[in-house]
Amino acid sequence: MDRTKHLAERDLALASAHAAMSTAAPRVAADPRRPAYHFLPPAHWMNDPNGTVYHDGWHHLFYQQHPYSDRWDAMHWGHARSRDLVHWEHLPIALWPSKSLGEDHCFSGCAVVDDAGRPMAFYTSISGGRGPEQWLAVGDKDLIAWEKHAASPVLTLASHGSLAIDDWRDPCVFREAGTWYMVVGGHVHGETGCVFLYRSLDLVRWEFDGIPFRGTQGNWECPNLFRLGDKWVLIVSPHNSPYYWVGDLDLAACRFTPVAEGSVDVGNFYAPTTLLDGQGRRIMIGWINGCPLLPEGAPSPGWAGCMSLPRVLSLDATNHLVQTPVPELVSLRGEKQSLAPRTLAAGAMVRLDGLAGQLVELEIDIELSAPDAAAGLRLLAHSDGSAGLDLTFRAGSLELAGKTTPAYDPAPRLRRTLRVFIDHSVVEVYAEGFPCITRIAPDVTADDRSLFLRADGQARVHRLDAWALRPA
Ligand code: FRU
């Protein structure tokens, strides 16, 4: 490809994309449903996080973006960076579909920095005229300006010999013992979701190793494979709730052997990806899909989607995945209000005026009086208690706005601490022993800010703390 032409095409594509977003930004900023401390672009559509990488003191977040409308189309890679994973700075779009190279979309992928300090982004290039291909782009030292590497595609469907593969996309690259590895999602034609493994010494020439692990149904998107403690974790997005396996990886034998598994988040959460930060923490960010949740025929909101809060990953004693919001989020906390411990009678519905709001973090330590009792909160409700999202804790399950998950620890427990983040129409719930649940409040207005304690069967609230949060 002619480099001058390539760069001229990039500048033109980026200038018109940025202009489209700037025009829409003022209108969407006024939408009361729009999150204020979850990351999202200035306007229009976003989906999967891509290329999350920590480099030179910055956490970089790239993401699937359609800069021209609030609908999925012509995928670009948006870009932002943050020092603290809480406050983000928007940067120019990093990747754009190169029309002169026949590209229609730059699908999901990853980024790494090689030994020479060169940022390398891998993504699935989509064109109506050919099958998916894995492409490489090289960034400048600040990861801001990107060019497509002349060796692209670095992998094509032909790399698999006679194996017929469908939905082959979303490369995830990692290094182990001096060799680079890549996993890509999809499935062998007529078979079930799996990951495909490749290896390289220079990030440019890749060889297909085989299929280290496959599922029992469907198709797998956005695989992530990384070390966590002395285990390996595989996370995939199977067109519904992302799922993980924790196990052992034998790269020489191309074999992953799981010892534990479970859901990552059973709500509006998809295509998570991870990075290793400067402190050696494994941090995951996912796409909160379906927000804003719109009634039939509602006017176009001008924005769609946001990112989850960054979550630190660890394993518990049974090798299940534990997710904790990054501690840096405490920098958003304003005034703290606490509720005196109290017992809730069966059927109670108690409005908590001092602790209410739409930008709030709550921590509740709650105990059920009996294994068949249920208790919890109603969030973002009208002041009369109608509407809102119900969070319900039972001995063996947790439910938020119609999505339920069983506990993953085998012994049902009557007492748990739940942590809740409310950000206008978005709610994330973290609870020890459960996968996360992220949900969207439909049609929330600035007045839907009331918080209620609810009980169905007697329960004891040992502690309830609430912090007003500042926008990021
Ligand atoms: C997951 C996904 C990926 C794909 C991208 C396209 O949400 O379908 O598999 O690369 O979105 O935007």
Image: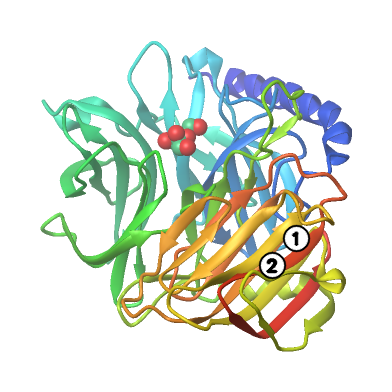
Q: As shown in the figure, which amino acid type bears the numbered disc 2?
A: Asp
- Asked if one can make out residue 472 in the rendered structure from this viewpoint, the answer is no
Disc 2 packing (10 Å; few <14; some 14–19; many ≥20):
some
- The secondary element bearing badge 2 is classed as loop
Q: Quadrant location of residue 252?
A: bottom left
Please give the residue where the numbered disc 2 appears in the rendered image: 84
Q: Spot the residue most to the top.
A: 129
| Front one among 102 and 142 | 102
Residue at the image position 68 percent from the left and 49 percent from the top: 80
Disc 1 packing (10 Å; few <14; some 14–19; many ≥20):
some
Total label count? Answer: 2
Q: Quadrant location of residue 372?
A: bottom left
Vertical relation: 237 (above or below) 158:
below
Residue at the image position 83 percent from the left and 39 percent from the top: 31
Q: Is residue 274 left or right of residue 417?
A: left
Between the residue at mark 1 and the residue at mark 2, the CA separation in whole angstroms equals 6 Å
Q: Quadrant location of residue 205?
A: top left
Q: Which quadrant is the C terminus positioned in?
A: bottom right
Please give the residue where the numbered disc 1 appears in the rendered image: 87
- The secondary element bearing badge 1 is classed as loop
Residue at the image position 72 percent from the left and 48 percent from the top: 387
Answer yes or no: do the residues labelled 1 and 2 have beta carbons within 8 Å?
A: yes
